[in-house]
Image (spheres, grey):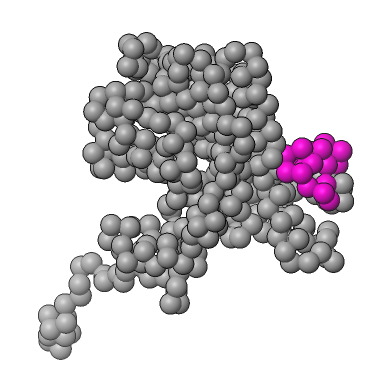
Amino acid sequence: MNDDITSSSANPQPTTPHRRRVRYSGKNPRRFEEKYKERDPQRYANTVAKVLASGKTPAGTHRPIMVSEILAALAPQPGELAVDCTLGYGGHAREILGRLQPGGRLLGLDADPMELPKTEARMRAAGFGPEMFTVIRSNFAGLPKALTESGIQNSEFRIGKADCILADLGVSSMQIDDPARGFSVKTDGPLDMRMNPQRGFPASALLARSSPEALARLLQENADEPRASELADPLAGKTFATTKALGAAIRATLPRLGKDDLDLTLRRVFQALRIAVNDEFSALDMLLRHLPSCLNPGGRVAILTFHSGEDRRVKKSFEAGLRDGLYADIAQEVIRPTPEERHDNPRSAPAKLRWARKID
Protein backbone atom coordinates (compact mmCIF):
# COMPACT_ATOMS: atom_id res chain seq x y z
CA MET A 1 0.00 0.00 0.00
CA ASN A 2 2.87 2.36 0.91
CA ASP A 3 4.56 1.55 -2.40
CA ASP A 4 1.38 2.58 -4.26
CA ILE A 5 1.21 5.91 -2.44
CA THR A 6 4.89 6.69 -3.11
CA SER A 7 4.61 5.87 -6.82
CA SER A 8 1.57 8.10 -7.25
CA SER A 9 3.12 11.13 -5.56
CA ALA A 10 6.45 10.78 -7.35
CA ASN A 11 4.92 10.72 -10.84
CA PRO A 12 1.92 13.03 -10.85
CA GLN A 13 -0.27 12.87 -13.99
CA PRO A 14 -0.70 16.13 -15.89
CA THR A 15 -4.20 17.53 -15.70
CA THR A 16 -4.14 18.59 -19.38
CA PRO A 17 -2.62 16.18 -21.89
CA HIS A 18 -0.03 17.67 -24.24
CA ARG A 19 -1.26 18.11 -27.80
CA ARG A 20 1.11 18.56 -30.71
CA ARG A 21 0.51 21.34 -33.19
CA VAL A 22 -1.09 20.06 -36.38
CA ARG A 23 1.46 19.94 -39.17
CA TYR A 24 1.07 19.22 -42.83
CA SER A 25 2.58 16.03 -44.16
CA GLY A 26 5.66 16.17 -46.37
CA LYS A 27 7.88 19.06 -47.36
CA ASN A 28 5.14 21.01 -49.11
CA PRO A 29 1.44 21.23 -48.19
CA ARG A 30 -0.98 19.51 -50.55
CA ARG A 31 -4.39 19.58 -48.91
CA PHE A 32 -6.12 22.96 -48.76
CA GLU A 33 -6.74 22.60 -45.04
CA GLU A 34 -3.01 22.04 -44.43
CA LYS A 35 -1.82 25.17 -46.20
CA TYR A 36 -1.90 27.13 -42.94
CA LYS A 37 1.31 29.00 -43.76
CA GLU A 38 -0.08 30.50 -46.93
CA ARG A 39 -3.36 31.28 -45.20
CA ASP A 40 -1.55 33.38 -42.58
CA PRO A 41 0.39 35.80 -44.82
CA GLN A 42 1.36 38.20 -42.05
CA ARG A 43 3.11 35.45 -40.13
CA TYR A 44 4.56 33.58 -43.10
CA ALA A 45 5.41 36.34 -45.58
CA ASN A 46 8.42 34.43 -46.96
CA THR A 47 6.27 31.42 -47.83
CA VAL A 48 3.74 33.62 -49.61
CA ALA A 49 6.53 35.36 -51.52
CA LYS A 50 7.89 32.02 -52.74
CA VAL A 51 4.47 30.91 -53.94
CA LEU A 52 3.96 34.20 -55.79
CA ALA A 53 7.42 33.99 -57.34
CA SER A 54 6.59 30.54 -58.73
CA GLY A 55 3.64 32.01 -60.66
CA LYS A 56 1.01 30.51 -58.36
CA THR A 57 -1.63 32.00 -56.10
CA PRO A 58 -1.22 31.44 -52.34
CA ALA A 59 -3.98 29.33 -50.81
CA GLY A 60 -6.89 31.33 -49.48
CA THR A 61 -5.96 34.47 -51.43
CA HIS A 62 -6.68 36.03 -54.81
CA ARG A 63 -4.54 38.09 -57.16
CA PRO A 64 -6.44 40.97 -58.80
CA ILE A 65 -6.23 40.91 -62.59
CA MET A 66 -5.45 43.82 -64.96
CA VAL A 67 -5.34 46.37 -62.14
CA SER A 68 -3.62 49.14 -64.09
CA GLU A 69 -5.91 48.67 -67.10
CA ILE A 70 -9.01 48.83 -64.89
CA LEU A 71 -7.78 51.96 -63.11
CA ALA A 72 -7.12 53.59 -66.49
CA ALA A 73 -10.65 52.74 -67.67
CA LEU A 74 -12.41 53.86 -64.48
CA ALA A 75 -10.18 56.88 -63.75
CA PRO A 76 -11.42 57.18 -60.13
CA GLN A 77 -11.08 60.69 -58.68
CA PRO A 78 -11.03 62.03 -55.10
CA GLY A 79 -14.52 62.53 -53.71
CA GLU A 80 -16.23 60.13 -56.13
CA LEU A 81 -18.42 57.12 -55.38
CA ALA A 82 -17.30 53.78 -56.82
CA VAL A 83 -18.94 50.35 -56.73
CA ASP A 84 -17.11 47.03 -56.87
CA CYS A 85 -19.91 44.67 -57.86
CA THR A 86 -17.82 41.57 -57.16
CA LEU A 87 -15.69 42.44 -54.14
CA GLY A 88 -13.97 39.04 -53.84
CA TYR A 89 -10.67 39.30 -51.99
CA GLY A 90 -10.74 43.10 -52.23
CA GLY A 91 -7.67 43.58 -54.43
CA HIS A 92 -9.31 45.88 -56.97
CA ALA A 93 -11.27 47.69 -54.25
CA ARG A 94 -8.11 48.62 -52.32
CA GLU A 95 -6.51 50.14 -55.41
CA ILE A 96 -9.65 52.08 -56.32
CA LEU A 97 -10.18 53.31 -52.75
CA GLY A 98 -6.69 54.76 -52.65
CA ARG A 99 -7.54 56.96 -55.63
CA LEU A 100 -10.92 58.09 -54.25
CA GLN A 101 -9.35 59.83 -51.28
CA PRO A 102 -9.85 62.29 -49.85
CA GLY A 103 -13.61 62.25 -49.53
CA GLY A 104 -14.46 59.33 -51.80
CA ARG A 105 -16.36 56.14 -50.96
CA LEU A 106 -16.61 52.63 -52.29
CA LEU A 107 -19.56 50.25 -52.06
CA GLY A 108 -18.55 46.59 -52.23
CA LEU A 109 -21.02 43.89 -53.23
CA ASP A 110 -20.55 40.13 -53.05
CA ALA A 111 -22.96 37.22 -52.83
CA ASP A 112 -20.58 34.86 -51.02
CA PRO A 113 -21.53 34.75 -47.31
CA MET A 114 -18.34 32.83 -46.45
CA GLU A 115 -15.74 35.11 -48.03
CA LEU A 116 -17.40 38.52 -47.63
CA PRO A 117 -16.86 38.84 -43.84
CA LYS A 118 -13.19 37.88 -44.27
CA THR A 119 -12.68 40.51 -46.94
CA GLU A 120 -14.43 43.20 -44.90
CA ALA A 121 -12.20 42.39 -41.93
CA ARG A 122 -9.07 42.65 -44.10
CA MET A 123 -10.20 45.98 -45.52
CA ARG A 124 -10.96 47.38 -42.05
CA ALA A 125 -7.55 46.22 -40.82
CA ALA A 126 -5.97 48.05 -43.77
CA GLY A 127 -7.52 51.29 -42.55
CA PHE A 128 -10.64 51.55 -44.69
CA GLY A 129 -13.31 52.52 -42.18
CA PRO A 130 -17.09 52.71 -42.67
CA GLU A 131 -16.85 56.37 -43.62
CA MET A 132 -15.15 55.36 -46.89
CA PHE A 133 -15.99 51.68 -47.41
CA THR A 134 -19.42 50.00 -47.19
CA VAL A 135 -20.20 46.32 -47.71
CA ILE A 136 -23.51 44.76 -48.78
CA ARG A 137 -24.07 41.05 -49.39
CA SER A 138 -25.75 41.02 -52.77
CA ASN A 139 -25.46 39.58 -56.24
CA PHE A 140 -24.43 42.22 -58.78
CA ALA A 141 -27.87 41.89 -60.39
CA GLY A 142 -29.11 43.75 -57.31
CA LEU A 143 -26.93 46.81 -57.99
CA PRO A 144 -29.77 49.40 -58.22
CA LYS A 145 -31.32 48.24 -54.96
CA ALA A 146 -27.95 48.11 -53.20
CA LEU A 147 -27.05 51.62 -54.33
CA THR A 148 -30.36 53.02 -53.17
CA GLU A 149 -30.60 51.18 -49.86
CA SER A 150 -27.01 51.96 -48.92
CA GLY A 151 -28.01 55.63 -48.73
CA ILE A 152 -24.58 56.68 -49.96
CA GLN A 153 -24.47 59.99 -51.81
CA ASN A 154 -22.05 60.60 -54.63
CA SER A 155 -20.04 63.75 -55.24
CA GLU A 156 -23.16 65.51 -56.56
CA PHE A 157 -25.22 64.35 -53.56
CA ARG A 158 -27.29 61.88 -55.55
CA ILE A 159 -28.38 58.61 -54.00
CA GLY A 160 -28.46 55.60 -56.30
CA LYS A 161 -25.85 56.94 -58.73
CA ALA A 162 -22.16 56.02 -58.94
CA ASP A 163 -19.20 57.56 -60.73
CA CYS A 164 -17.30 54.30 -61.28
CA ILE A 165 -18.58 50.72 -61.46
CA LEU A 166 -16.44 47.59 -61.71
CA ALA A 167 -17.61 44.02 -62.23
CA ASP A 168 -15.02 41.22 -62.24
CA LEU A 169 -16.97 38.15 -63.37
CA GLY A 170 -14.27 35.61 -62.56
CA VAL A 171 -14.44 33.07 -59.75
CA SER A 172 -12.03 33.97 -56.96
CA SER A 173 -9.06 31.79 -56.15
CA MET A 174 -10.39 31.34 -52.60
CA GLN A 175 -13.44 29.60 -54.05
CA ILE A 176 -11.58 27.58 -56.68
CA ASP A 177 -8.93 26.32 -54.25
CA ASP A 178 -11.28 25.32 -51.44
CA PRO A 179 -12.43 21.69 -52.00
CA ALA A 180 -15.50 22.25 -49.83
CA ARG A 181 -16.89 24.66 -52.43
CA GLY A 182 -16.75 22.09 -55.26
CA PHE A 183 -15.60 24.46 -58.02
CA SER A 184 -12.61 22.45 -59.24
CA VAL A 185 -11.80 18.86 -60.15
CA LYS A 186 -8.21 19.24 -58.91
CA THR A 187 -9.13 18.29 -55.33
CA ASP A 188 -12.01 16.11 -54.20
CA GLY A 189 -15.00 17.75 -52.59
CA PRO A 190 -18.79 17.91 -52.75
CA LEU A 191 -20.09 18.78 -56.23
CA ASP A 192 -21.61 22.10 -55.19
CA MET A 193 -20.34 25.23 -57.05
CA ARG A 194 -22.80 27.69 -55.48
CA MET A 195 -21.44 31.19 -54.90
CA ASN A 196 -23.91 31.40 -52.03
CA PRO A 197 -24.18 27.92 -50.47
CA GLN A 198 -27.27 29.07 -48.56
CA ARG A 199 -29.36 29.42 -51.72
CA GLY A 200 -30.33 27.33 -54.73
CA PHE A 201 -29.27 23.81 -55.63
CA PRO A 202 -25.77 22.34 -55.99
CA ALA A 203 -24.34 21.13 -59.30
CA SER A 204 -24.95 17.52 -58.27
CA ALA A 205 -28.71 18.20 -58.13
CA LEU A 206 -28.61 20.00 -61.48
CA LEU A 207 -26.99 17.02 -63.17
CA ALA A 208 -29.34 14.54 -61.51
CA ARG A 209 -32.44 16.24 -62.87
CA SER A 210 -31.09 17.17 -66.34
CA SER A 211 -32.13 15.40 -69.53
CA PRO A 212 -29.43 14.60 -72.11
CA GLU A 213 -30.88 17.20 -74.47
CA ALA A 214 -30.91 19.93 -71.81
CA LEU A 215 -27.39 19.09 -70.63
CA ALA A 216 -26.02 19.14 -74.19
CA ARG A 217 -27.48 22.64 -74.69
CA LEU A 218 -26.08 23.78 -71.34
CA LEU A 219 -22.56 22.57 -72.16
CA GLN A 220 -22.67 24.20 -75.58
CA GLU A 221 -24.17 27.53 -74.53
CA ASN A 222 -22.25 27.98 -71.27
CA ALA A 223 -18.83 26.66 -72.29
CA ASP A 224 -18.70 26.15 -76.08
CA GLU A 225 -17.92 22.50 -75.36
CA PRO A 226 -17.41 20.71 -78.72
CA ARG A 227 -18.16 17.29 -77.21
CA ALA A 228 -21.40 18.38 -75.54
CA SER A 229 -23.57 15.71 -77.22
CA GLU A 230 -21.05 12.96 -76.51
CA LEU A 231 -20.93 13.86 -72.83
CA ALA A 232 -24.64 14.46 -72.29
CA ASP A 233 -25.90 10.86 -72.24
CA PRO A 234 -23.36 9.48 -69.72
CA LEU A 235 -23.74 12.47 -67.35
CA ALA A 236 -27.39 13.58 -67.52
CA GLY A 237 -29.72 12.15 -64.89
CA LYS A 238 -26.83 10.61 -62.96
CA THR A 239 -25.83 11.23 -59.36
CA PHE A 240 -22.28 12.48 -58.79
CA ALA A 241 -21.73 13.41 -55.18
CA THR A 242 -18.15 14.66 -55.56
CA THR A 243 -15.97 16.55 -58.00
CA LYS A 244 -13.70 13.52 -58.44
CA ALA A 245 -16.67 11.29 -59.29
CA LEU A 246 -17.76 13.66 -62.05
CA GLY A 247 -14.20 13.98 -63.31
CA ALA A 248 -13.83 10.20 -63.46
CA ALA A 249 -17.07 9.88 -65.44
CA ILE A 250 -15.87 12.47 -67.97
CA ARG A 251 -12.56 10.68 -68.38
CA ALA A 252 -14.30 7.34 -68.83
CA THR A 253 -16.52 8.84 -71.53
CA LEU A 254 -13.54 10.19 -73.50
CA PRO A 255 -10.83 7.52 -73.04
CA ARG A 256 -8.96 8.35 -76.25
CA LEU A 257 -8.71 12.06 -75.65
CA GLY A 258 -5.22 13.48 -75.04
CA LYS A 259 -4.36 14.92 -71.65
CA ASP A 260 -4.40 18.59 -72.70
CA ASP A 261 -7.72 18.27 -74.54
CA LEU A 262 -9.17 16.28 -71.65
CA ASP A 263 -8.11 18.94 -69.14
CA LEU A 264 -9.80 21.61 -71.28
CA THR A 265 -12.99 19.55 -71.43
CA LEU A 266 -12.98 19.06 -67.67
CA ARG A 267 -12.64 22.81 -67.11
CA ARG A 268 -15.37 23.58 -69.63
CA VAL A 269 -17.83 21.13 -68.08
CA PHE A 270 -17.22 22.54 -64.60
CA GLN A 271 -17.52 26.08 -65.95
CA ALA A 272 -20.82 25.31 -67.69
CA LEU A 273 -22.29 23.79 -64.55
CA ARG A 274 -21.10 26.69 -62.38
CA ILE A 275 -22.68 29.25 -64.70
CA ALA A 276 -25.96 27.34 -64.65
CA VAL A 277 -26.00 26.72 -60.89
CA ASN A 278 -25.50 30.43 -60.17
CA ASP A 279 -27.64 31.68 -63.09
CA GLU A 280 -24.72 33.89 -64.03
CA PHE A 281 -25.84 34.89 -67.52
CA SER A 282 -29.23 36.12 -66.28
CA ALA A 283 -27.52 38.12 -63.53
CA LEU A 284 -25.12 39.65 -66.06
CA ASP A 285 -27.96 40.55 -68.44
CA MET A 286 -29.75 42.32 -65.57
CA LEU A 287 -26.60 44.20 -64.57
CA LEU A 288 -26.00 45.37 -68.14
CA ARG A 289 -29.61 46.51 -68.41
CA HIS A 290 -29.39 48.59 -65.22
CA LEU A 291 -25.90 50.07 -65.68
CA PRO A 292 -26.81 53.32 -67.48
CA SER A 293 -29.39 54.25 -64.84
CA CYS A 294 -26.88 53.56 -62.05
CA LEU A 295 -24.17 55.82 -63.46
CA ASN A 296 -23.73 59.52 -62.87
CA PRO A 297 -23.38 61.61 -66.08
CA GLY A 298 -19.86 60.98 -67.32
CA GLY A 299 -19.62 57.87 -65.12
CA ARG A 300 -17.41 54.96 -66.15
CA VAL A 301 -17.93 51.20 -66.04
CA ALA A 302 -15.42 48.39 -66.54
CA ILE A 303 -16.30 44.69 -66.83
CA LEU A 304 -13.81 41.85 -66.68
CA THR A 305 -15.03 38.62 -68.34
CA PHE A 306 -13.57 35.12 -68.58
CA HIS A 307 -15.81 33.38 -71.10
CA SER A 308 -16.86 34.16 -74.67
CA GLY A 309 -20.55 34.10 -73.68
CA GLU A 310 -19.95 36.80 -71.07
CA ASP A 311 -17.82 38.91 -73.41
CA ARG A 312 -20.42 38.74 -76.20
CA ARG A 313 -23.10 40.03 -73.84
CA VAL A 314 -20.96 42.91 -72.61
CA LYS A 315 -19.84 43.87 -76.13
CA LYS A 316 -23.38 43.89 -77.55
CA SER A 317 -24.77 45.83 -74.58
CA PHE A 318 -22.08 48.52 -74.78
CA GLU A 319 -22.49 48.80 -78.55
CA ALA A 320 -26.27 49.16 -78.18
CA GLY A 321 -25.79 51.78 -75.46
CA LEU A 322 -23.46 53.78 -77.69
CA ARG A 323 -25.90 53.53 -80.60
CA ASP A 324 -28.84 54.60 -78.42
CA GLY A 325 -27.02 57.60 -76.96
CA LEU A 326 -26.64 56.16 -73.44
CA TYR A 327 -22.86 55.93 -73.64
CA ALA A 328 -20.55 58.61 -74.99
CA ASP A 329 -17.69 56.20 -75.64
CA ILE A 330 -16.86 52.50 -75.34
CA ALA A 331 -13.79 50.30 -75.74
CA GLN A 332 -13.37 49.71 -79.46
CA GLU A 333 -11.25 46.61 -78.90
CA VAL A 334 -11.16 44.08 -76.10
CA ILE A 335 -8.28 44.62 -73.65
CA ARG A 336 -6.28 41.58 -72.56
CA PRO A 337 -3.64 40.96 -69.88
CA THR A 338 -0.05 41.69 -70.85
CA PRO A 339 2.28 38.75 -71.56
CA GLU A 340 4.06 39.56 -68.30
CA GLU A 341 0.85 39.27 -66.27
CA ARG A 342 -0.14 36.04 -67.98
CA HIS A 343 3.28 34.64 -67.09
CA ASP A 344 3.18 35.83 -63.48
CA ASN A 345 -0.48 34.89 -62.95
CA PRO A 346 -1.64 32.12 -65.34
CA ARG A 347 -5.22 32.46 -64.09
CA SER A 348 -5.38 35.84 -65.83
CA ALA A 349 -4.92 34.31 -69.30
CA PRO A 350 -8.62 34.12 -70.37
CA ALA A 351 -9.52 37.58 -69.00
CA LYS A 352 -11.05 40.22 -71.30
CA LEU A 353 -11.76 43.81 -70.28
CA ARG A 354 -14.30 46.21 -71.82
CA TRP A 355 -15.30 49.67 -70.62
CA ALA A 356 -17.93 52.33 -71.35
CA ARG A 357 -18.47 55.98 -70.39
CA LYS A 358 -21.93 57.43 -69.91
CA ILE A 359 -22.95 60.61 -71.67
CA ASP A 360 -22.32 63.86 -69.76
Q: Quadrant of residue 334?
A: top right
Where is residue 84? Give x, y as percent: 44, 31
Residue extent of the magenta highlight: 205-228
Q: Quadrant of residue 236?
A: top right
Nearer-the-camera pick, 330 or 289? 330
Q: In this rendering, is residue 50 above or below 285? A: below
- Residue 164 falls left or right of residue 231: left
- Closest to the observer, 218 or 334: 334
Instruction: Find residue 146 and report its horizontal and vertical position in percent.
Output: 44, 20
Taking the magenta stretch, the answer to whether it contains residue 321 is no
Can residue 81 be seen in this snapshot?
A: yes
Q: Residue at x 77, y 37 (%)?
A: 221
Which residue is found at the position 68% from the left and 26% from the top? Answer: 316
Looking at the image, can residue 5 be seen? Answer: no
Q: Residue at position x 29%, y 23% from top?
A: 79
- Horizontal side of residue 198 vs 60, given as left or right: right
Q: Main secondary structure of the magenta part?
A: helix
116 or 334: nearer the viewer: 334
Is 209 left, or right, of 108 in this rendering? right
Question: Was residue 225 drawn as part of the magenta stretch in this picture?
Answer: yes
Q: How many numbered circles are shown? A: 0
Q: Nearer the viewer, residue 280 or 156?
A: 156
Which residue shows up at 56% across the image and 38% down it?
353
Give the x, y percent position of residue 16.
23, 67
For residue 258, what is the image quadrant?
A: bottom right
Residue 64 picture location, percent across and down? 45, 46
Q: Does residue 308 sit above or below 179 in this rendering?
A: above
Image quadrant occupied by the N terminus: bottom left
